[in-house]
Image (cartoon, rainbow, N blue to C red):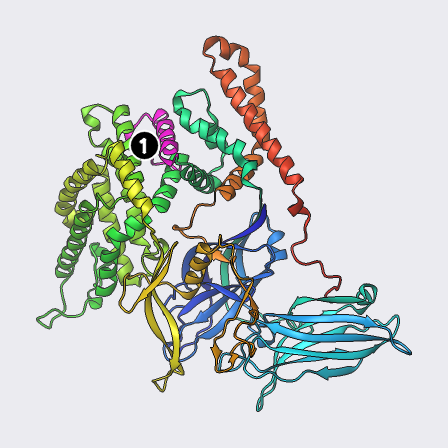
Amino acid sequence: MAKRSSLSIRIVEGKNLPAKDITGSSDPYCIVKVDNEPIIRTATVWKTLCPFWGEEYQVHLPPTFHMVAFYVMDEDALSRDDVIGKVCLTRDTLVTHPKGFSGWAHLTEVDPDEEVQGEIHLRLEVVPGTRACRLRCSVLEARDLAPKDRNGASDPFVRVRYNGRTQETSIVKKSCYPRWNETFEFELEEGATEALCVEAWDWDLVSRNDFLGKVVFNVQRLWVAQQEEGWFRLQPDQSKSQQKEGNLGSLQLEVRLRDEMVLPSGCYQALVQLLCREVKLGTQGPGQLIPLIEEMTSTECRQEVATNLLKLFLGQGLAKDFLDLLFQLELGRTSEANTLFRSNSLASKSMESFLKVAGMRYLHGVLGPIIDRIFEEKKYVELDPSKVEVKDVGCSGLHRPQTEAEVLEQSAQTLRAHLGELLSALCRSVRACPAVVRATFRQLFQRVRERFPSAEHENVPFIAVTSFLCLRFFSPAIMAPKLFHLRERHADARTSRTLLLLAKAVQNVGNMDTPASRAKEAWMEPLQPSVYQGVTQMKDFITKLVDIEEKEELDLQRALSLQAPPVKEGPLFIHRTKGKSPLLSSSFKKLYFSLTTEALSFAKTPSSKCVNELNQWLSALRKVSINNTGLLGSYHPGVFRGDKWSCCHQKDKTDLGCDKTRSRVTLQEWNDPLDHDLEAQLIYRHLLGMEAALREKHRELSAGTETASVLTGCGEASEDRLAQLLQVLQDLQEAHNCSPVSSLPLEPNYLLELQT
């Protein structure tokens, strides 16, 4: 069993940021750090003081983290990026907001003395003396100190202060992982209230020394303990005045912390088996737990529940059956064909999650080249006459301003070309579509055709497929390619408008060019011939897509399972060299890497157009190595050059690492491996929240058991299944209460107490 923490982060927008550029504007982006480790970088929003990001992230991290910080930066092309300000949220703050922290937070100044990181290894003991006891402080080593010098390191030394006396260690040059092994002693008077302060500093020859952090100890507690040794986290100088908020602007955030105690797999077996039986029985069986869960799940958490259920059944090989059950439930309560799958039902939300989990690589293969071309061309495209701005177009080949009619015609040609290219790529992609996705769409197509068999509803099965494939998958990815990992940056205003118009055209094709969709925006009429032709292509594509037999599905799935799909692909800057430009102090060699669950390989030429940042690569490496039983507890972040390690200056190449291995902070992405136990725990927690409603439903069924059993027999069966579910929830609750992990402290229980 294990305790796992996750952060749901949404970086919404900023407002009233200060201007950092000579143009009177800024180019802001955000860096998110967990305990000073950078994990997220948003896209840069150019030339604005009120940026909108709207980026969402899920971060898995150890429950021992202390703080999450949001730094707003201004990107500069020729110099170091400017720091605008930051927002810090401690773990304690997030715990006091069980529904999450949401709202505007003022940016505060970034004080160098507050930007501390790392830990220091100390041994403290009270030893008897001839006249009085003595306090002995052994400063052993430190790790992960903040780099304060331009060479990417520091020259650290430690200053120990007690009862008016100060002693210092020697200086270790060019290291963030120094080793001192020096001991200091102070006279200790009984009943003394003075605190022991251990400070780390970076030595500078010319300017003032830089503060690296400190630890303050209660000597009275040490007197009781007599001896204590361990790693202690360096703290900022809290004696200084609080940071000024000033007029640095504000940041709108949504941050939610969730701690989960994940039990061993066997504890969840009864719950998983019960839910799987429900899916296998389908709507024909007596069990109705899935409809009951849907009925009692609120709208705001339906997406989360749908994702958890989908991943659970995907891990059990029942995703297609689960979705088929939801299709049948939705069709059973739908009377009008034009309202089918238009609501935010559990079926719609589950299908959205399914496509993102199972079909994202397919989406990248179809859309990626087209999106890249649109970003590279940066053409001005507009079809709405009321929004045409001729001055933005420039001049034609005749060296005269283009007329509005010419702009509209050129825009229509550009969009027709993009739409035609997209539909052609889609038609060629039938075999590339994952077998489980094709089989699920086949089930959907057949169910809808059985429910609406008349000739007037001939297009309804096709629209049912496109309502997910086009309206809820391809179109959103076209409008916001960064959110679907198609691009690393948001589109500028011109490109964004092109993407929006293309997405509208795809939606019209997905709606099978119905009169209702055509009447909404009459200015889309120039694309009508392409849309009409696209409907024919789309119907032909769907016909081929759903034409998959059970044997073919199994064969394709088996072939896919034999491959090792990439976890990450793209360029990575790995080698630091001397600068070759007067504007740059250093440069990096770029190689193209591919990481699978089996190997890490690289080449000098690109194998993918997807650009991944360093923290995403670290996250991917941690995921593929999470089950490695031989994972080292510590490592050397430097290199062995000459006769010593560059990080800690140890002389032996085989010496133990000087820094602890950080293996647990990861970003949740669409290609993450399934965690069956965690999904089962999340479903259990959700069901536990509706336990009172489930018990009330059970009482209702119990009261009507006699009548229901006489008429159909369904009431008794439903009651039995619900009773089993309630018993499973009770057993899991008892297992959590008896869990030894729940009583353990989050960190080593040092007897020394930090002074505040």
Side (left or right) of 394 relative to 601:
left
Q: Quadrant of residue 490?
A: bottom left
Residue at point 63%, 40% (across, down): 736
Side (left or right) of 525 relative to 560:
left
From this view, report whether residue 298 is shown above or below residue 674: above
Magenta run includes residue 334: yes
Residue at point 80%, 79% (across, down): 186
The residue at the far bottom in this view is 206
Q: How many numbered badges does the structure rendering display?
A: 1
> Residue 665, how many percent across, how many down?
51, 58
Query: Which of these two is toward me, 177 or 543?
Result: 177
Q: Secondary structure at mark 1?
A: loop
Magenta run includes residue 179: no
For label 1, count other residues whose C-alpha is less than 10 Å away and answer few (under 14), some (14-19) or many (20+).
Answer: some
Residue at point 37%, 77% (across, down): 23
Q: Quadrant of residue 587?
A: bottom left
Side (left or right) of 353 relative to 378:
right
Q: Quadrant of the C terminus?
A: bottom right
Query: Which of these two is toward me, 176 or 370?
Result: 176
Residue at point 39%, 54% (across, down): 597
Circle 1: residue type: Leu
> Residue 279, how many percent across, how many down?
42, 29
- Residue underneath mark 1: 340
Magenta stretch bounds? 318-345
Q: Quadrant of residue 194?
A: bottom right
Q: Quadrant of the N terminus?
A: top right
> Residue 599, how many percent across, how many down?
37, 58
- Magenta region's main secondary structure? helix
From this view, report whether residue 254 is shown above or below residue 397: above
Q: Is residue 257 visible?
A: no
From this view, report whether residue 46 is shown above or below residue 314: below
> Residue 123, how many percent across, how many down?
72, 71
